Image (cartoon, rainbow, N blue to C red):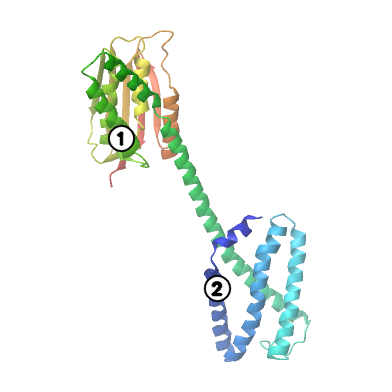
């Protein structure tokens, strides 16, 4: 079936009734006042609308799907002309037997059936109604289809975004549990503190950011700090500095958008590195942009060639979904430092 036929059910019956009722009333009052004969106006409009309505729906739901949408324009034209001629015969006969033997009282002189002027007048009138009603219907159909497509795109956006979010650092939790297990075997006094921090991380991921497009930046910073404290279990000598150069109280960001960047610093900086240094700089520029810069040192070797991994790829995909092309994510190496620079528009609390 064609899209028009499917969308027919989206426009409720009462809206069809309202349209035709309003149109009939307007025509009845207009021609009744014009000829000062409301009885004739009512009868003639009753006949005309009993033909207008079937013709409009026959055109929309039979002729258009079967001919126009299949690009059979000649067949459509012939079918429409045949339909108009059938309407002319019915209108003329009903007018003659129900209202008056004068089949066209509105004219200045008496016309007989099949007079060329009368045929043209009736057909043009039907085409006018057909065009107007079809325009209204197709416009409403287009609006509903646009909203449906927008809804589908939004759902696809949410599903894709959720998929990317679900890929964020699942291995981190497994690594942390393994580290926690090793500490428990050693009867380490760090176990309770690690459990609390891990619990806070999981609570944030599973509950606080679930179904939320933006979260306060301050909460993301807290999450990153807890993450860093747990990652320090894997590294004996690690120094992490976080600099907040601006007021970030009212700023919101996509949840878990920075964590892959921080994780990348541990991942590539920690290989063969006995003195890992990570620096995180966060500042607001011109009250419009949020700039995040993450630097980590690394030991240059054949096995350690810092570059963007799957985490950075997923982060870039998420950023593109959320901000389109209105963001910047760059990474580079300078001497023995790996630098990630992210710039996104500010999303304020209000």
- Name which residue lies at 23% across and 33% down: 246
Q: Are the residues at dot 1 and dot 2 in contact (C-beta closer than 8 Å)?
A: no
Q: Kindly tell me whether residue 119 is visible in this rendering.
A: no
Identify the secondary structure beneath mark 1: helix
* Quarter of the rendering containing residue 167: top left
Which residue reaches farthest right?
Answer: 114
- Name which residue lies at 37% across and 18% down: 267
- Name which residue lies at 23% across and 39% down: 249
Q: Nearer the viewer, residue 191 or 149?
A: 191
Of the two numbered discs 1 and 2 on the same chain, state the one appearing first in sequence.
Answer: 2
Q: Position of residue 107 (x, y in %)?
A: 68, 87
Quarter of the rendering occupied by the N terminus: bottom right
Identify the secondary structure beneath mark 2: helix
Residue density around tag 2, few if under 14, some if 14–19, many if 20 or more, within 10 Å = few
Residue where numbered disc 1 is placed: 204
Is 110 placed above or below 337 here? below
Q: Nearer the viewer, residue 96 or 122?
A: 96
Residue density around tag 1, few if under 14, some if 14–19, many if 20 or more, within 10 Å = some
Q: Kindly tell me whether residue 18 is visible in this rendering.
A: yes
Judge left or right: residue 116 versus residue 313: right
Q: Position of residue 119 (x, y in %)?
A: 74, 78
* Quarter of the rendering containing residue 234: top left
Q: Position of residue 303 (x, y in %)?
A: 43, 9
Residue 214: which numbered mark, if any?
A: none
Residue where numbered disc 2 is placed: 17
Is 70 placed above or below 240 here? below
Q: CA distance from mark 1 to mark 2?
A: 53 Å
* Quarter of the rendering containing residue 200: top left
Q: Position of residue 301 (x, y in %)?
A: 40, 8
- Given this view, does label 1 or label 2 mark the residue nearer the observer? 1
Q: Nearer the viewer, residue 170 or 344?
A: 170
């Amino acid at each position: 079936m064609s899209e028009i036929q499917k969308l027919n059910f989206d426009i409720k019956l009462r809206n069809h009734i309202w349209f035709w009722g309003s149109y009939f009333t307007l025509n009845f009052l207009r021609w009744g006042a014009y000829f000062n004969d409301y009885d004739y106006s009512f009868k003639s409009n009753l006949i005309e609308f009993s033909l207008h309505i079937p013709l409009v729906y026959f055109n929309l739901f039979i002729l258009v799907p079967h001919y126009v949408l299949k690009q059979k324009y000649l067949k459509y034209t012939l079918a429409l002309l045949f339909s108009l001629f059938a309407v002319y015969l019915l209108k003329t006969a009903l007018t003659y037997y129900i209202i008056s033997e004068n089949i066209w009282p509105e004219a200045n002189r008496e016309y007989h059936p099949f007079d060329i002027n009368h045929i043209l007048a009736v057909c043009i009138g039907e085409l006018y109604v057909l065009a107007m009603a079809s325009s209204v219907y197709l416009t409403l159909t287009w609006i509903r289809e646009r909203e449906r497509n927008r809804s589908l795109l939004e759902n696809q956006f949410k599903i894709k975004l959720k998929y990317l979010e679900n890929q964020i650092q699942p291995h981190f939790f497994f690594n942390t549990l393994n580290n926690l297990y090793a500490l428990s075997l050693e009867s380490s006094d760090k176990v309770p503190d690690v459990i609390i921090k891990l619990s806070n991380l999981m609570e944030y991921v599973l509950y606080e950011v679930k179904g939320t497009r933006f979260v306060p930046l301050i909460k993301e910073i807290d999450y990153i700090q807890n993450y860093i404290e747990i990652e320090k279990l894997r590294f004996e000598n690690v120094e992490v500095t976080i600099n907040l150069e601006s007021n970030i109280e009212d700023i919101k960001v996509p949840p878990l958008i920075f964590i892959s960047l921080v994780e990348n610093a541990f991942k590539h900086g920690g290989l063969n590195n006995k003195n890992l240094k990570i620096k995180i700089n966060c500042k607001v520029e011109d009250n419009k942009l949020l700039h995040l810069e993450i630097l980590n040192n690394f030991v240059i070797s054949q096995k350690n060639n810092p570059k963007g991994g799957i985490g950075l790829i997923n982060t870039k995909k998420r950023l593109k979904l959320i901000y389109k092309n209105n963001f910047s994510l760059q990474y580079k190496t300078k001497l023995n430092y790996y630098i990630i620079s992210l710039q996104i528009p500010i999303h304020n609390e209000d």
